[in-house]
Amino acid sequence: MTRGTDAFSRLMTAMEDTDPACQDDDRFVLDDQPAHTLVQICRACPVFDLCKEYAAIAKPAGGVWAGRRYVNARGGREGQS
Ligand code: SF4
């Protein structure tokens, strides 16, 4: 198991016992939503640390993870907030 898949597995397991606000909120996946409006939501999230760890390792191709927006590397931006 790679570090990324291991971190993702830990995050998914933790999410089974919680209900993170991003689950049903399109602002976390739409590219035109500024991440700074979501930071407070993420900071209050019970799985923030696991989410941040996964994103730091895997550098997701898109979406907001632990209050930071990740954009497909081909777009030239990564980890914008
Ligand atoms: S910290 Fe991660 S899991 Fe929690 S609300 Fe933010 S994006 Fe969702």
Image (cartoon, rainbow, N blue to C red):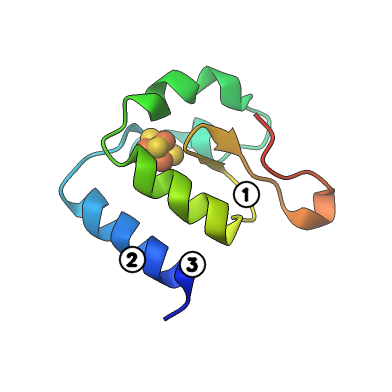
Q: CA distance from mark 1 to mark 3?
A: 15 Å
**Residue 57, position in %: x, y?**
54, 59
| CA neighbours of label 1 inside 10 A, class few (<14), some (14 to 19), many (20+) | some
Task: Report the Cα–Cα distance between label 3 and label 2.
Answer: 9 Å
Is 55 placed left or right of 16 in the picture? Answer: right
Q: Earlier in the sequence, mark 1 or mark 3?
A: 3
Compared to residue 76, the image places residue 7 above or below, namely below
User: Label 2 CB, ligand 1: below 8 Å?
Assistant: no
x, y percent for residue 64: 54, 39
How far apart marks 1 and 2 lie (CA) works out to 18 Å
The answer to whether residue 22 is seen in the rendering is no
User: Along the polypeptide, which appears first: circle 1 or circle 2?
Assistant: 2
* Residue 45 tag number: none
Residue drawn at 40 percent across, 62 percent down? 7
Q: Dot 3: what SS?
A: helix
Residue on which the image places disc 3: 4
Residue lying at 33% horizontally and 32% vertically, measured from the top left: 21
Q: Quadrant of the C terminus?
A: top right
Residue 66 appears left or right of 81: left
Amino acid on which disc 3 is placed:
Gly
- The disc placed on residue 9 is 2
Name the amino acid type tagged 1. Gly
Residue 48 lies in what quarter of the image?
top left
Neighbours of disc 2 within 10 Å: few (<14), some (14-19), many (20+): some
Rendered image: mark on residue 62: 1
Quadrant in which residue 23 is drawn: top left
User: Would you identify the image quadrant in which residue 10 lies?
Assistant: bottom left
Q: Residues within 10 Å of mark 3 (few under 14, many from 20)?
A: some
Say above or below: 16 vs 52.
below
